[in-house]
Image (spheres, grey):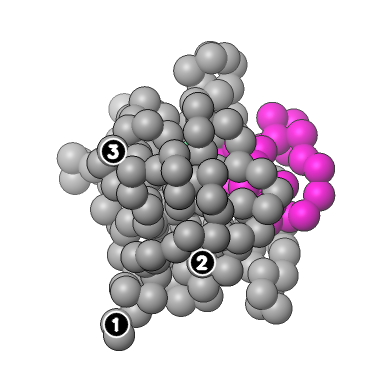
Amino acid sequence: MGEMEDLCVSECTRCPALVDSRSQIVNGTGPEDADILFVGEGPGAQEDSQGEPFVGRSGSVLDDQLRIVGLDRDTVRITNCVRCRPPENRDPTADELENCRGYLEQEIELLDPDVIVTLGKVPTEHLLDRDVAVTKEAGSVEDVRINGTPRRLLICVHPAATLYDRSQEETFASALERAAELAGVDGSENASGQTRLDGF
Ligand code: URA
């Protein structure tokens, strides 16, 4: 089995409520050697129907901001804490998060990213294993052991937060800039291939 297959779950019935509510398992997307791993909460309606994480409104916010900081969706990996859509978009329960944890840990281990960016409260608290006031702590970097290996984690607000509260846009943007910096990605080239001429 190739590494890409190891990053994907094709069958799972650990969470009875999610087996009922999902139409498919939504695995992470992006290269298996990506430097940056974004971790969201769980699939919503769009993700459940298309089988890809962050393809709805939050996904457009994420894509736009990635482009602005010189990153491209195709060069980063994007995944979720749980791979099946919870009913009515409720938060995943503690049991559901735990049931899916092994898949996330395996994805992190195989990818071995320079930085893990947690999008919102659920993934941040899940991976840091503590209460987090995400809007206050967004942009801060913490070292955390995941499955025994030290990892660098950058706290970020969920892209949807910028849709409800415009003041979060700046917080979101600077966190993504920091992620690009930490991964050593040159953000001076934007997605159109044009070098940004700051100050001109
Ligand atoms: N929100 C998430 O946390 N994950 C998705 O995949 C989509 C929206």
Question: What amino acid type is highlighted by mark number 2?
Answer: Tyr
The span picked out in magenta is: 117-139
CA neighbours of label 2 inside 10 A, class few (<14), some (14 to 19), many (20+): many
Q: Residue at x 72, y 70 (%)?
A: 145
- Rendering coords of residue 60 (x, y %): 33, 30
Q: Against 115, is 64 above or below? A: above
Q: Quadrant of the N terminus?
A: bottom left
| Residue 49: in magenta span | no
**In this image, 43 relative to 135: left or right?**
left
Question: What amino acid type is highlighted by mark number 3?
Answer: Ser
Q: In this rendered view, identify the residue nearer to me: 173 or 126.
A: 126
Question: What amino acid type is highlighted by mark number 1?
Answer: Gly
Q: Residue at x 46, y 76 (%)?
A: 110
- Rendering coords of residue 108 (x, y %): 52, 68
CA neighbours of label 3 inside 10 A, class few (<14), some (14 to 19), many (20+): some
Q: Secondary structure at mark 2?
A: helix
| Residue 124: in magenta span | yes
Q: Are marks 2 and 3 in contact (CB under 8 Å)?
A: no
> Residue 103 shows which numbered tag?
2
Q: In this rendered view, identify the residue nearer to me: 170 or 108.
A: 108
Which residue bears the numbered disc 1? 2
Which residue bears the numbered disc 3? 49
